[in-house]
């Protein structure tokens, strides 16, 4: 889904020689195609370390609250993205084999995008969960029920995969045998696949902005509620108020700074490809680079999430501390034996 979008009618009118040559010249003048893959490879060991630790802790963390249920699913999504990220980066390199590129287009890139939006949706559910617990602490809403949280988390995975990922996998079914040059995932899609791709991009962008509104409203309400409770209790704990504001500010900043640019760029980029003009190949190349760079920024979320777990979740923080202490004790004991 991250390759240039062209309808069959539009791809048919692109000149096979002049335009592609001009586009390659623009490509070399605008950016080095190795830049973004290199950034992914640099981030991979950091993401692998952080998410391995997060997965290790979450496996030993009991699902005693709905927040922990959503957190565990978020850890799983981040871990999947971490492993697929390196495959996507390798297939984006200019010298990548055709087989790797095709397999990546048909499966790994699709799952990568699907998991990205699973992460975004789970972050929205975490915001709603905190909203209900703080704004309506005595309410017996389904959102505060462990079974409900497990069901809704499962539905997020299933609905996004069946609704967006699976059709893209199935509809990327064109044979590459007759293609002289394969440089776009869109070449693997027929008319139905191209149409579905366009609708999927629009739907997922709409989903992001809807969740953005939900998260913003939830955390603003949470902040006001907590500060009001300080005032009602007669507390002058300005440090506590500032800490609450800082936490909310951090969550919103991380969410919008990481995901916002990609979703702002993605919409005009998609329509730029739909209305492709052979007179301006440079603008298409520039748009693609901006989209790829903003996608990398969105992907850095897999490095930020483990830090947010420690900062926002007391259970996660305590379990991590306990496990690190046990590892330290075991290490010291083994050293003493030597």
Image (cartoon, grey):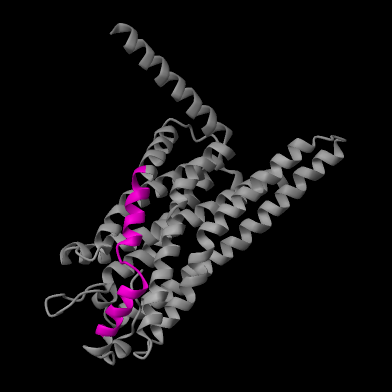
Return the x and y of residue 47 as percentages of the image width and height: 39, 45
Badge count = 0
Residue 174 on the magenta span: no
Residue 266 visible here = yes
Above or below, comparing residue 79 to residue 328 in the picture: below
The quarter of the image holding the C terminus is top left
At 40% from the left edge and 75% from the top edge, which residue is drawn?
A: 286
At 52% from the left edge and 40% from the top edge, which residue is drawn?
A: 309
Return the x and y of residue 13 as percentages of the image width and height: 28, 92
Q: Is residue 222 left or right of residue 170?
A: right
At 47% from the left edge and 68% from the top edge, which residue is drawn?
A: 204
Q: Is residue 329 left or right of residue 253?
A: left
Above or below, comparing residue 176 to residue 311 in the picture: below
Return the x and y of residue 253 as percentages of the image width and height: 60, 54
Residue 137 visible here = no
Q: Which residues are magenta?
A: 20-45
Q: Nearer the viewer, residue 174 or 69?
A: 174
In the image as oriented, which residue stretches furthest toward the top? 337
Where residue 94 sits, quadrant-wise, is bottom left
């Amino acid at each position: 889904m991250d390759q240039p979008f062209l309808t069959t009618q539009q791809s048919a009118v692109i000149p096979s020689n002049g335009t592609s040559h001009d586009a390659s010249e623009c490509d070399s003048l605008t950016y080095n195609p190795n830049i973004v893959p290199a950034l992914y490879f640099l981030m991979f060991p950091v993401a692998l370390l952080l998410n391995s630790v997060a997965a290790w802790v979450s496996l030993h963390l009991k699902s005693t609250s709905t927040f922990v249920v959503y957190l565990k699913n978020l850890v799983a999504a981040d871990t999947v993205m971490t492993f697929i990220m390196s495959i996507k980066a390798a297939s984006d390199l200019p010298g990548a084999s055709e087989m790797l590129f095709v397999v990546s287009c048909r499966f790994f890139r699709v799952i990568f995008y699907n998991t990205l939006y699973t992460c975004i949706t789970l972050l929205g559910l975490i915001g709603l969960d905190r909203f209900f617990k703080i704004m309506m602490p005595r309410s017996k809403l389904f959102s505060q029920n462990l079974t409900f949280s497990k069901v809704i988390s499962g539905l997020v995975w299933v609905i996004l995969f069946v609704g967006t990922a699976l059709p893209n996998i199935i509809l990327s079914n064109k044979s590459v045998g007759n293609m002289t040059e394969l440089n776009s995932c869109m070449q693997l899609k027929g008319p139905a696949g191209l149409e579905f791709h366009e609708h999927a991009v629009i739907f997922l962008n709409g989903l992001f902005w809807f969740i953005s509104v939900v998260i913003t409203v939830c955390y603003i309400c949470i902040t006001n509620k907590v500060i009001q409770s300080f005032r009602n209790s007669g507390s002058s704990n300005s440090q506590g108020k500032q800490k609450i504001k800082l936490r909310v500010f951090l969550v919103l900043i991380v969410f919008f700074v990481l995901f916002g640019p990609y979703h702002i760029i993605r919409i005009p980029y998609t329509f730029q490809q739909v209305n492709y003009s052979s007179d301006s190949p440079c603008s298409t190349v520039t748009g693609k680079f901006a989209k790829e760079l903003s996608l990398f920024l969105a992907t850095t979320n897999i490095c930020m999430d483990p830090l947010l777990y420690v900062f926002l979740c007391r259970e996660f923080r305590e379990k991590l501390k306990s496990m690190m202490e046990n590892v330290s004790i075991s290490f010291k004991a083994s050293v003493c034996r030597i």
